[in-house]
Each structure stands twice: as structure tokens, then as C-alpha cells.
């Protein structure tokens, strides 16, 4: 596979054919192998995702769209190639560290990260293409509801919620394409600047506030109790998700409306994670049952 | 959302591609070479868990146990069934035709061989065996393996809890000797890496070159920063910046290509 990575980098004109390449590899539990490739001659780094199970071309398109809209916050996607049964996505490699809860807590005192986080939501709103139809969330919510209603893990509370759900639940929520997995693990800091990774779900939902909910849940802890606290706390200033009110304002989403939409966001969360394995699905199902 | 080539959702089986430890181990050993249509040989002495199994999509998979004395079992030549197990004596020449494999796997094998020859220097044993393996590789074929990191200072090994249960106590090669022995045996495009967290369930490999090592361990450290005390973080940060992790990690993973 490393020969294919070399071939991809060479035929994209990124490295010389005889370049000495060094590979750092992560085989995590996802569907792609992630590599940081160092061109020792040019001292240049590339990030490569290699997948023999699925085509990464859609992921590459999402990355390109994200890079167009969030240029300062996203590694630059360079090329996507299919070689010998492998789908290879090449991007610039940004040395960074994963953001922690402590970073966001510290952001209360240091404005830079907080401003960049709020700025991210403002950019998302400003770059939103606008909805093509009058009820923009209807189709997505119909798909999500149908999937969840048919899923084996759907509990009685979810079934009741889905039976009663109609367009009134989401009609007044602004249409802003969401990152889709806006959790701490997918946020980084490079020299103090915010970076956002893993854009494969970008635009899967445009339900404004979903990303704010996900990062809030991520800092509060992935549990039903955290989701209930986010839903029930009127003033979040003293909470770990203190940034949520400003982020909602940047998204033109009233904070009270955001809080009312928490069950809806959880439902979307479950739908977007439908391909992430049984264990993840069961964890979200449990949260859903307790919150609904 | 990612879809399979047949449109099947990624998680339809309930198990993601690299969720199992054996899938990750297989993926790591298949990094340097494509095994579709290839012939693969795993040489082993002690049972550390097999690398090759029926999941390998190679044309030929041979799992060969090296034993003392002259008690090898007959090996069909040419090899007939796709998956085959056999024994060979480590005191005799390897019973395989020249250029008959595209990948030879040495999962802890060099350490175990060094243990089997206590009167000789581990590095010499490793060099000799890599020299014996090179001819049975086809031109461009790959030798890949892992072993304990011989660069680890004894005091560090003791502090970390000694050797891993069931693994060889001899480390045949260290960070630098691994590179030089592979090159000395005629292999090219050699990469030596640290592997963690566990050779049976690997998730990361980081090349031992200073830039690559520093980058990988810096990322690993920063990812765990929240769980560390300030002093603990600072000490580790110094270790990372001095690129000492490559000498302290428990295991090495390496590969090299036979010259064409």
C-alpha cells in the first residue's frame, strides 16, 4: 500500500520519483488508514488517508468544499486518486494537537481560541448557500426518521417521539450546513489557532445548532445527564459549554430555541453515526431513551 | 457518508474494518507490500499469536515453525494448498526455493532466534538470518517483522515492569542496529519504526528518523496531556523534543525490500 501512496504523491507532482519518503502510520478503528508522509529531501509533510473498503471521493469533495469556506481552519485537500483497489486522499499535513476540555476552559481567559470558535460559526452562517426549498430540513429529517424507526435499537421513547415528530419541530431552525462531527477529537490547535478536521459528514445536515450541541456535549461529557443539562440550563455562562450562547447568536439561532432542539440534535447524532458500528449506536440509543 | 462500492453502508456488519486486533495486525504487515496474488511466509519459533491466517488474500500463505535439531516436517514443493503449515530446523538451510516469496514475516522471530543461540551475539544471529531470508524473497520482495527494542536502557525496562509476559527476553536489534543489519543483508528502502501500543494489536507506527519520531510522539503526548500533571507533561515533552522516545518504546517494527 505504501508503494501506492508513493505513486499517488509522485503522479500528483508532489514528490520526486526517487524521493526518500518516511511513513508514520495510524491504523485506528475507522475504515481508513491514516499516514503522515515525510519527504525527507524537501522536508515536506503530507497527510494521506488510504481506504480499500470504500471510495473516498465523496469525502474529498466535502474536504474541498470545507476548505473553500473555512480556509484558515482546514488542512488543504490536494488530490484524490484510485489506485489498485485503494482510494487515496492526500492533504497538507498540519502539525497540531487535539483540543482538550482544558483548552476551552482556558478560552474563558484567553480570547483567541474563543473568538476563533465563534468566528467559525459566523463563517458557517455567512458561507451558507441558502436553502433551495421552503422546508429545507424536511427531506433530511424524513430520511433520519425512517432509518431510526426501522433500526433495531429504537426504544419506546424514540418510537413515540418519531410518531409525533413533524415539520413544526424544525421548520424555524436556520439552514446552515453543519460539520457533522464537531467534537473535541476533531478539533486541533496549531500554534494557538483553531483547526477543524474530519469533514466527511460536512453538509449531511444543515440544522443550525447541531455542531454547537455536539461540541457542548463533547466538553460536558457524552452522557444523557449532560444532554439534559444542556437542554435545561437557561444561562450557560458558568457551564463548560459557556460559549454556546455566543455561538448560537453567531448562527442566528435563539439560545432558547437551541435548547428546545436538543432531542432533535440527538436524533440527528444517532442518524449520522449509523455506520459507526454497533457499540457507538447502542451508546447513543441509551442517551436518546433517557433524554426523550 | 461513506458507502461501500456496492452501496452497502460502512457499518452493515456491525464491525468496522480495523476494529479487531487481528485486522490491524494484518494491515500493518501489509503496508509495505500488496499481498493479492503474492506468496507469504511467516517464520516463527514461539507462540506469540500468528500473524497469517485464512483472512490473508494472498495466493500462497505458509506458516513455518522453526525448531531445533533436525526435525523439520516435509514441505510440498511446489507448495500446493493456499494455506500451509510446516516445520523447519533452524540448524539447517531453509527448505524453500529461491525467490519463492513476496513477503516474509518475522513477528518476534529474530528475538526468539537470538534466544535460541545464547552463545552468540543477538545482532550476529539477526544478520545471519536476514542473510538467509533474502534469497528466498523474490526481487522486490519484502521482509517485515517486529521485536523488542534493544535500545531500551535496562533501568527503563525494569521501571516499566520488565519484559512482557511470554515474549523473548533477548532483544536482537536496537534502533540503529536494526537499520544497519537490514542494509547489510542487502535490503533497500529500509524503514525502522516504533510500534505501539501492542504488537498483537497495533495502532500506530512511527519511523525512528528524528523528524518523524518527534512529530509522532509530540502528537501522542499532546493527545494525552489532559491526563498528565504539569511536571509529568514537561518531563515527557523534553523526552519527545530530544527524540528519546524511539529508544524507550518497547517494540520496533521494520521492513526492507530485496533489491531487484
Image (cartoon, coloured by chain):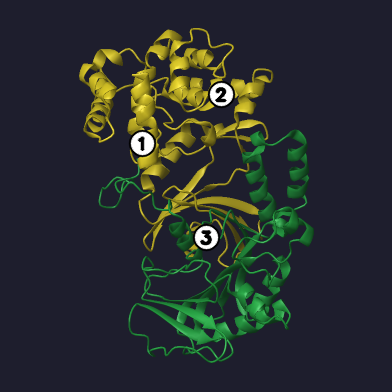
Chain colours: A yellow, B green
Instruction: Tell me the SS state at disc 3.
Output: loop
Q: Which residue is mark 1?
A: A281
Q: Which residue is mark 2?
A: A117
| Residue nearer the viewer, A75 or A149 | A149
Q: Is residue A161 above or below residue B237?
A: above
Instruction: Tell me the SS state at disc 1.
Output: helix
Q: Is residue A44 above or below residue A241?
A: below
Q: Chain of mark 1?
A: A
Q: Chain of mark 2?
A: A
Q: In the image, are marks 1 and 3 on the same chain?
A: no
Q: In the image, are marks 3 and 2 on the same chain?
A: no
Q: Give left or right: position of B173 versus A125.
A: right
The residue mark sitting in front, 2 or 1, is 1
Spatial CA distance of label 1 from label 3 is: 27 Å
In contact (CB < 8 Å): disc 1 and disc 3: no
Q: Is residue B219 above or below residue A268?
A: below
Q: Residue at x 28, y 24 (%)?
A: A158
The answer to whether residue B108 is visible is: yes
Q: Residue A272: x, y in percent?
A: 35, 33
Label 1 crowd bin: few (<14), some (14–19), many (20+), radius 10 Å: many
Q: Give left or right: position of B102 versus A57.
A: right
Label 3 crowd bin: few (<14), some (14–19), many (20+), radius 10 Å: some
Quadrant of the image containing the N terminus of chain B: top left
Please identify the quarter of the rendering in which residue A156 is found. Answer: top left
Q: Residue A161: x, y in percent?
A: 26, 19
Q: Residue at x 66, y 76 (%)?
A: B115
| Residue nearer the viewer, A130 or B125 | B125
Residue B200: give its label: 3
Amino acid at each position: 500500500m505504501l508503494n501506492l501512496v508513493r505513486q499517488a504523491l509522485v503522479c500528483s507532482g508532489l514528490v520526486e520519483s526517487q524521493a526518500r519518503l518516511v511513513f508514520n502510520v495510524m491504523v485506528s478503528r475507522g475504515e481508513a488508514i491514516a499516514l503522515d508522509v515525510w519527504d525527507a529531501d524537501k522536508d515536506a509533510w503530507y497527510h494521506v488517508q488510504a481506504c480499500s473498503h470504500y471510495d473516498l471521493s465523496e469525502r474529498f469533495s466535502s474536504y474541498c468544499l470545507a476548505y473553500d469556506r473555512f480556509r484558515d481552519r482546514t488542512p488543504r485537500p490536494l488530490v484524490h486518486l484510485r489506485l489498485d483497489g485503494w482510494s487515496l486522499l492526500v492533504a497538507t499535513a498540519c502539525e497540531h494537537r487535539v483540543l482538550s476540555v482544558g483548552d476551552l476552559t482556558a478560552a474563558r481567559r484567553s480570547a483567541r481560541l474563543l473568538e476563533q470558535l465563534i468566528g467559525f460559526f459566523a463563517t458557517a452562517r455567512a458561507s451558507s448557500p441558502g436553502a433551495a426549498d421552503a422546508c429545507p430540513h424536511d427531506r433530511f429529517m424524513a430520511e433520519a426518521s425512517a432509518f431510526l424507526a426501522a433500526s433495531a435499537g429504537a426504544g419506546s421513547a424514540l418510537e413515540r417521539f418519531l410518531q409525533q415528530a413533524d415539520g413544526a419541530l424544525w421548520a424555524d431552525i436556520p439552514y446552515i450546513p453543519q460539520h457533522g462531527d464537531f467534537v473535541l477529537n476533531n478539533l486541533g490547535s496549531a500554534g494557538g489557532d483553531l483547526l477543524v478536521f474530519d469533514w466527511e459528514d460536512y453538509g449531511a445536515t444543515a440544522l443550525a445548532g447541531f455542531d454547537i450541541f455536539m461540541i457542548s456535549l463533547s466538553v460536558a461529557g457524552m452522557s444523557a445527564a449532560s444532554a439534559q443539562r444542556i437542554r435545561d440550563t437557561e444561562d450557560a455562562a458558568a457551564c463548560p459549554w459557556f460559549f454556546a450562547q455566543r455561538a448560537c447568536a453567531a448562527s442566528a439561532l435563539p439560545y432558547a430555541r437551541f435548547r428546545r432542539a436538543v432531542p432533535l440534535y440527538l436524533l440527528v447524532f444517532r442518524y449520522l453515526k449509523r455506520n459507526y458500528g454497533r457499540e457507538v449506536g447502542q451508546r447513543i440509543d441509551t442517551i436518546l431513551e433517557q433524554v426523550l | 457518508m461513506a458507502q461501500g462500492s456496492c452501496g452497502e453502508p460502512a457499518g452493515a456488519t456491525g464491525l468496522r474494518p480495523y476494529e479487531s486486533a487481528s485486522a490491524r495486525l494484518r494491515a500493518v504487515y501489509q503496508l509495505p507490500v500488496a499481498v493479492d496474488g503474492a506468496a507469504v511466509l511467516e517464520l516463527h519459533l514461539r507462540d506469540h499469536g500468528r500473524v497469517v491466517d485464512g483472512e490473508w488474500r494472498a495466493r500462497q500463505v505458509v506458516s513455518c515453525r522453526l525448531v531445533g535439531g533436525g526435525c523439520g516436517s516435509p514441505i510440498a514443493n511446489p507448495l500446493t494448498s493456499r494455506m500451509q503449515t510446516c516445520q523447519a530446523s533452524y540448524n539447517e538451510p531453509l527448505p524453500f526455493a529461491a525467490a519463492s516469496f513476496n513477503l516474509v514475516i518475522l513477528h518476534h522471530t529474530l528475538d526468539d532466534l537470538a534466544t535460541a543461540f545464547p552463545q552468540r551475539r543477538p545482532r550476529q544471529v539477526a544478520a545471519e538470518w536476514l542473510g538467509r531470508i533474502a534469497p528466498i524473497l523474490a526481487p522486490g520482495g519484502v521482509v517485515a517483522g517486529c521485536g523488542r527494542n534493544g535500545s531500551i536502557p535496562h533501568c527503563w525496562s525494569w521501571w516499566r515492569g520488565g519484559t512482557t509476559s511470554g515474549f523473548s527476553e533477548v532483544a536482537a536489534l536496537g534502533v540503529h542496529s536494526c537499520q544497519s543489519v537490514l542494509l547489510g543483508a542487502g535490503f533497500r528502502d529500509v524503514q525502522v519504526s516504533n510500534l505501539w501500543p501492542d504488537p498483537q494489536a497495533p495502532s500506530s507506527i512511527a519511523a525512528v528518523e528524528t523528524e518523524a519520531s518527534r512529530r509522532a510522539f509530540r502528537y501522542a503526548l499532546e493527545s494525552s496531556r489532559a491526563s498528565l500533571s504539569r511536571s509529568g507533561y514537561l518531563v515527557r515533552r523534553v523526552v519527545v523534543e530530544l527524540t528519546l522516545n524511539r529508544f524507550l518504546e518497547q517494540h520496533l517494527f521494520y521492513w526492507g525490500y530485496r533489491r531487484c
